[in-house]
Image (spheres, rainbow, N blue to C red):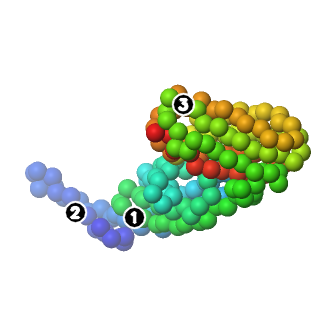
């Protein structure tokens, strides 16, 4: 029914009747606000007819249906909001790291083998130009953190071996953060 004021007549099984006034209102317009901060994005759905479904996508990878994402890699993201009446609204945004993929503290980073088998381990190799506290985070495509490690590394070349035997096959986002807040994310495929 369309929004508006209606008169409803109710008649019972013995013929008694009554008239009632009913007002049907339109729901608030469907709206979606997206906030991106560091390695996370939050969608704030508004209006529509609950329950509301939030769907995130990076081309070729669905990232989840929660309002918050963590450990997101750089790229163009699409966010879609759907309410119970199948009304939809969508938007997109570009997320960029604070540091380029090829640099970490003016050094370099490599991730290998990629893809890696689930029963194996992968290696993260990087060079630092100063002593640093390094945070390593691994997120699945739903934004759930599956691995976290914090290590103090000295100037020069370092290699970290990260086991993957407890991980299911799929796409993971490897994120490194320095003590100064520089961040790099790369995609890892586990076969």
For image coordinates 50% across by 50% down, the residue present is 63
Seen from the viewer's position, the closer of residues 151 and 46 is: 151
- How far apart in space, not on screen, are marks 2 and 1 (Cα)? 31 Å
Is residue 91 positioned above or below 38 on the image? below
Q: Can residue 35 be seen from the camera position used here?
A: no
Report which residue position mark 3 lands on. Answer: 120
Q: Which mark is residue 87?
A: 1
The quarter of the picture where residue 92 lies is: bottom right
How far from the left and from the top, in percent, is residue 168?
47, 34
Label 1 to label 3: alpha-carbon separation? 45 Å
- Horizontal side of residue 134 vs 55, given as left or right: right
Whichever of callouts 1 and 3 sits on the residue coming sooner in the sequence is 1
Please name the residue shown 36% across and 61% down the image. Answer: 86
Q: Can you tell which of label 2 and label 1 is closer to the viewer?
A: 1
Q: Nearer the viewer, residue 125 or 147?
A: 125
Q: Which residue is mark 2?
A: 9
The front one of 80 and 24 is 80
Q: Assess disc 1: are there few (<14), some (14-19) or many (≥20) residues with their C-alpha within 10 Å of its C-alpha.
A: few
């Amino acid at each position: 029914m369309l929004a508006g004021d209606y008169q409803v007549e109710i008649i019972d099984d013995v013929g008694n009747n009554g008239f009632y006034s009913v007002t049907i209102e339109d729901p608030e317009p469907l709206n979606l606000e997206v906030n991106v901060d560091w390695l996370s994005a939050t969608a704030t759905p508004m209006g529509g007819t609950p329950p509301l479904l939030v769907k995130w996508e990076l081309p070729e990878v669905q990232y989840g249906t929660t309002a918050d994402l963590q450990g997101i890699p750089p790229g163009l993201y699409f966010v879609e909001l759907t309410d119970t009446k199948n009304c939809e609204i969508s938007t997109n945004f570009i997320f960029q790291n604070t540091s380029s993929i090829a640099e970490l503290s003016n050094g370099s980073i490599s991730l290998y083998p990629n893809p890696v088998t689930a029963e194996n381990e992968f290696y993260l190799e990087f060079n630092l130009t100063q002593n640093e506290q390094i945070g390593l985070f691994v997120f699945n495509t739903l934004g759930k953190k599956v691995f976290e490690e914090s290590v103090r590394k000295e100037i020069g070349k370092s290699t970290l071996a990260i086991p993957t035997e407890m991980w299911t096959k799929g796409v993971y986002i490897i994120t490194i953060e320095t003590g100064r807040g520089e961040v790099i994310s790369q995609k890892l495929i586990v076969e």
